[in-house]
Image (cartoon, rainbow, N blue to C red):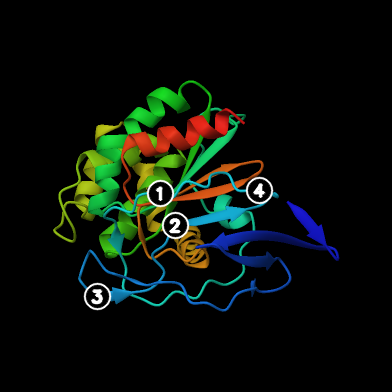
Amino acid sequence: MTKEDSDEKFSFQIEGKDYIISKKSKPQKKDQDKIIHAPSLAIGAVISGICIVVIIFGVENISDEPQQLIETQLVEEEIIPPEITIETFFANASPLLGNPNAPITLVEFGDYQCHFCNVYFQDTEHKIVENFVNTGKVKILFKDFIIIGPDSASAAHFAHCAGEQDKFWEYHNILYNNWAGENNGWASNNNLIQFANEIGLDMNELKKCNNENRYKSLIESSNSDARSLGLTGTPAFFVITNSGAQKIHGAQPYDVFENVFETLLEK
């Protein structure tokens, strides 16, 4: 991270073009070329901003290897990123999973009704936890990016309320283990209460937390963070170290994450 004229600034690149961001000023684009747009895989609408992004807080890229783009849940809207700071990645997130001193942080932006988020959870997340989180090499944060419907917001709120009883990740897991589609009722309020019963939550405390909407503002802020980063779909990931952050777009296979982690750990 570098400082210039007392303003905290970060440099980053989008498709090889240089940008600068500051806490006191909006990102300044050094190159006026436009980003290539790609079609929505979720609903067939044209959207903007699908790209592989490398964000640099230090002086060199974490990885020069391009990531393979695969299917991801997309939201149909034009994204104009406002200013970005380090807090955009770490604030308004879940409790930390893993060793707080782990050298790598994996930040996921997800929606509990998202098909491809569930694909990542079932096919990849368990292996990352077993091989990198449980060994103290990687820690994980989950941030909400609600793009599908009201049940997604309800599920996210229940998960944060479960976090008050130190069971955020247990509730996170039971949600994805009961995933059954989009906007079809599996994440209804009655089912969300049933999931809470299954993991032994104090129901009075949970209902009080939920009725008071204690985490409504946090979830909305997390959504704003996602848009600040130019995200257009879920899941989206940022692999962060002291020297920078690399984006992994979509439900990539485990090997992609493994290769990124191993490369960073060798430095």
Asked if the residue under mark 4 is in contact with the one under mark 1, i.e. CB atoms within 8 Å, the reply is no
SS of the residue at dot 1? Answer: loop
Which residue position holds label 1?
A: 67
* Foreground residue among 237 and 148: 237
Q: CA distance from mark 1 to mark 4?
A: 18 Å
Return the residue at label 3: 45
* Cα–Cα span, label 1 and label 3: 23 Å
Name the image quarter holding residue 195.
top left
Amino acid type indicated by mark 1: Gln
Badge 3 marks a residue whose secondary structure is: loop
Mark 3 or 4: the one toward you:
4
Element at label 2: loop
The residue pinned by badge 2 equals 52
Q: Is residue 5 left or right of residue 250?
A: right
Q: Earlier in the sequence, mark 1 or mark 3?
A: 3
**Mark 2: amino acid:** Ile
Q: Residue at x 61, y 63 (%)?
A: 84
Image disc number at residue 60: 4
Earlier in the chain: of badge 3 and badge 4, it is: 3
Viewer-side residue, 18 vs 108: 18
Query: Between 156 and 164, which is closer to the camera in this rendering?
Result: 156
Q: Is residue 97 visible?
A: no
Q: Name the kind of residue labelled 4 in the image.
A: Glu
The answer to which of marks 4 and 2 sits earlier in the sequence is 2
SS category of the residue bearing label 4: loop
Q: Is 103 left or right of 156, judged from the image as shown? A: right
Q: Residues within 10 Å of mark 1 (few under 14, many from 20)?
A: some
Look at 58% across and 58% down and name the residue there: 88
The reply to whether discs 2 and 3 touch (Cβ–Cβ < 8 Å) is no
Q: Residues within 10 Å of mark 4 (few under 14, many from 20)?
A: few
